[in-house]
């Protein structure tokens, strides 16, 4: 009888520890998510290189930027926004149709864009590049 009571107490403590651990992990994830902001960029439409003829790409990009207040600072700085826009167009125009139609090529382009755009920011960091629209034709 005494052993059953001890086992129940231990089981209760273990369950409480597991539940508390999950709750603190969820809080940590919420804090991390809250720390990031979303920067909407305009849609881009540009020629891309292809030996068989004219090809185009239409791209809509969103950047996940930390800290969150960096988003408003970027939006307020028209010169920085113009530089970001120019860099995206420059990177996109340098890609071929073959590179952009392939999922692996798109992921490489996404990472290249993240690194190049992060270098432009005086404050903050580009955590992720999200494609809201990606059409190659």
Image (cartoon, helix red, strand yellow):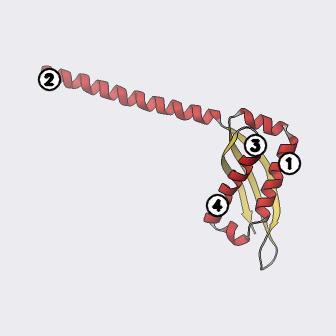
1 vs 3, front mark = 3
Question: Which quarter of the rendered picture does the N terminus lie within?
Answer: top left
The residue that label 3 is drawn on is 121
Q: Which residue is mark 2?
A: 3
- Secondary structure of the residue carrying tag 3 is loop
Q: Nearer the viewer, mark 3 or mark 4?
A: 3
Mark with earlier residue (3, 2): 2
Counting residues from the start of the chain, the first of labels 3 and 4 encountered is: 4
Q: Visible in this render: residue 131?
A: no
Q: Residue at x 41, y 27 (%)?
A: 20
Where in the figure is residue 34, as x and y percent of width and height?
Answer: 63, 33
Q: Which residue is mark 4?
A: 108
Q: Residue at x 83, y 45 (%)?
A: 81
- Where does label 1 land, which residue? 82
Left or right, 26 with reference to 122: left
Q: Secondary structure at mark 1?
A: helix
Distance, label 4 to label 2, CA atoms, is: 59 Å
What whole-number distance in Å separates the C-alpha atoms at marks 3 and 4? 21 Å
């Amino acid at each position: 009888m005494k052993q059953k009571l001890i086992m129940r107490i231990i089981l209760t403590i273990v369950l409480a520890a597991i539940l508390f651990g999950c709750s603190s992990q969820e809080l940590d994830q919420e804090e991390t998510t809250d720390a990031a902001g979303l920067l909407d960029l305009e849609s881009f439409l540009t020629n891309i290189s292809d030996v068989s003829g004219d090809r185009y790409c239409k791209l809509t990009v969103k950047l996940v930027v930390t800290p969150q207040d960096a988003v408003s600072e970027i939006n307020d700085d028209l010169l920085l926004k113009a530089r970001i826009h120019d860099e995206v167009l420059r990177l996109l125009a340098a890609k071929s149709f073959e590179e952009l139609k392939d999922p692996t090529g798109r992921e490489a382009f996404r990472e290249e864009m993240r690194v190049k755009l992060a270098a432009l920011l005086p404050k903050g960091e580009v955590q992720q590049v999200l494609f809201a629209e990606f059409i190659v034709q």
